[in-house]
Image (cartoon, helix red, strand yellow):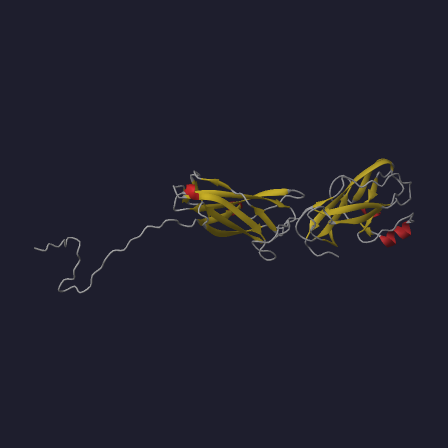
Amino acid sequence: MFLSDVSRLVVAGVDSPNVTVGTKMSIRNVEPEVLNVSINDGNPITLIPNSTKKVSCIAIVADYDGDVDISSVNATFYDPQVSFDKDTDDNNYHYTNSSCSVNLSYGTYNGYADDSYRALANCTFDVWYYADAAQWTCNVSVFDLSGGSGRGVGNENISQLLALGLPDSIDYGVVNATSVSEENQTNVTNYGNVIINLSLEGYAVTQGDGYAMNCTYGSVQNISVQYEKYNLTNSNPGTLNLTQFEANYTNLTSSAVVKFFNLTVRQNDTQNEISKPTYWRIYLPKGVAGNCTGHIVFGATTASGS
């Protein structure tokens, strides 16, 4: 007698000519994924004059073989308008972190709760003050123990940074009454990431007081602001009389005036080559004596200048 086990046999009924069967399989290894990338907590990046700013690119990564299967994470941070992921590093437009930190027990971040598959990768970059003012991309790659990989990207803006550097003071030395000082050269350095012009104004004690300097003695004790003058393009060395002085220099004013200066952005990663000279003199009128002090306000601006 022939016996047949029909307990798992699926047959079509008289009114049901179709049969549905289940399918299944097991996956041996799953490539890891990047689920989310956030730069600077989702805020525009403000750089620091003449320094670096630590920028964090944080990614939620996942490996469905278990987060312990994640072997490493790396990332690049770059300006995609002038660079690309595999480009060489340059402080103006490209940075690399080849070993991001990985946290397997991070709690919750950006709406992604920790579990046995997810991890938080923190990729930091020391971004220089002259990095491009543009929208940047963070490209994150995650790798597992079997050589599988996944990647994801995020974008964030680096804001314009207007900043300049100058010496603490302009010293005209010893000047005789009714004479013009010797020329002082004062260099201006761009400590930002955009081309700048200069705004200039002067005062003796309080802004807008109409004076260049206040002196300790004399019947007047104040030097009018128009007696302090500058040239932003040419040096005029040697001794000058008042007529020559007025012909070759521009009056300082008690309110800010924007002057064309076109100080470009640093490109050299070894040294700051972006510095330009400005030339200054002052005329000492009658009625002042002793020691004199004043202030000049240098401003960095993107406004067009005269």
Q: Tell me where residue 49 appears, x and y as whole percent.
A: 66, 44
Name, please, the residue furthest toward the front.
1
Closer to the camera in the image, 184 or 41: 41
- Where residue 194 appears, as percent x and y from the top left, is 66, 52
**Residue that appears at 51% across and 49% down:** 140
Relative height, residue 194 to residue 172 (above, below): below
Can residue 184 be seen?
A: yes
Residue 105: percent from the left, percent from the top? 43, 38
| Residue sitting nearer the eye, 84 or 127 | 84
In this orientation, does residue 252 appear?
A: no
In the rendered image, residue 101, in percent from the top left (x then y), is placed at: 51, 40
Left or right relative to 172: residue 60: left
Relative depth, front residue between 178 and 52: 52
164 to the left or right of 237: left
Q: In this view, which residue lies farthest toward the left? A: 1
The residue located at (73%, 56%) in the rendering is 305
Q: Quadrant of the C terminus?
A: bottom right
Image position of 13 (left or right of 233) = left
Query: Left or right: where does residue 121 sit relative to residue 239?
Result: left
Image quadrant of residue 6?
A: bottom left
Q: Nearer the viewer, residue 137 or 25?
A: 25
Say which residue appears at 50% left-offset and 47% top-offset.
Answer: 38
